[in-house]
Image (cartoon, rainbow, N blue to C red):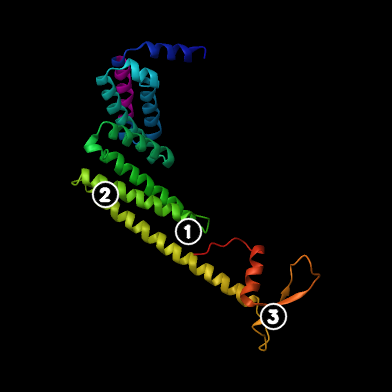
Amino acid sequence: MEGPAAESATAREKLSFERRLSLSREAKERGNALVHEKSYNEAKRAYDEAFVYMFYSQEEYEYELTQTEKEIYQDFLLTLHLNRGLCKLKLRDFDGAKWDFDEAQRYAKARCVHGGVGHPKALYRRALTLMEMVRVELEKAARREYWDDDRTLQWCSASETDLRDALSLAPADRAIPLALQELSNLRMQIVELQKAQRARSKALFAKLGSRTMKPDSNARKSHTCPSTDSGTNASTQPVTNEECIQASLPALERVRIY
């Protein structure tokens, strides 16, 4: 690495922990002010800058920082992850937001915050992020696009766990019960969509079944379908309606069955 970037990195490496922390706090305060202005993209950049000042390699962290500095470092990065995660959530970068809240939880548990359960803001905001990810899947379902209902329900369960843990840590926070109610509504939407999918699948298979039956009233329950055995040539064999339906399935579009 050459040029101004290398000089900047070299200058950063020579800074003391106190100086790095001071510069990082200044960037964090700029980010906080931008959040109040709802300038989330600019705020995220300010928090990114704050992270740069506080970057330490694993070796530097282990051998250059005192125990007190390590604790200050962990507490400060916990806050940075909370704030930057909020910006990503507002910018609909849900995967990035979840990662930041996961990191905030990791630092909170390392510091044994609230007995090792974690930080209520990290739990609450991660739950909101998961709920937004659920909404994205529900929007796909509404457009009749493929959506992963199993993963969506897993996100609902993880969100509920986070919200209940957050509520145990901050019982006076009124926003948490509201989020739990909204989560319940999302689950109901998932159930209704699953019912609709099952109904469509059932109707499709009923239609397929009707197409395999002969139109005349004297049609027998057993009729013939072309044999696919390699050892026979254009032979026919008696099969049931159900077997004919199954034989025709490979040529059809994939259908999800419940």
Mark 3 in CB contact with mark 1 (< 8 angstroms): no
**Residue 195: x, y in percent?**
44, 66
The answer for how far apart the CA atoms under marks 3 and 1 are is: 40 Å
Q: Is residue 142 above or below residue 136?
A: below
Relative vertical location of residue 101 with respect to residue 130 in this rendering, above or below: above
Place residue 188 in its image quadrant. bottom left
Residue under label 2: 164
**Image spot of residue 67 (x, y percent):** 26, 20
232 up-or-down from 30: above or below:
below
**If you read the primary sequence from the N terminus, does the residue marked by circle 3 or circle 1 appear first?**
1
Relative image position of residue 219 (x, y in whole percent): 67, 85
Secondary structure at numbered mark 1: helix
Residue 205: quadrant of the picture: bottom right
What residue appears at the point 61 percent right and 72 percent down from the top-left corner? 208
Residue at the right extreme of this rendering: 233
Say which residue label 1 marks.
Answer: 142
Amino acid bearing label 2: Arg
**Distance from Cα at disc 3 to Cα at disc 2:** 59 Å
Write the start and end of the magenta stretch as one range.
Answer: 19-33
The residue lying at 37 percent from left, 44 percent from top is 129
Q: Earlier in the sequence, mark 2 or mark 1?
A: 1
| Residue type of the residue flagged with mark 3 | His
Residue 223's mark? 3
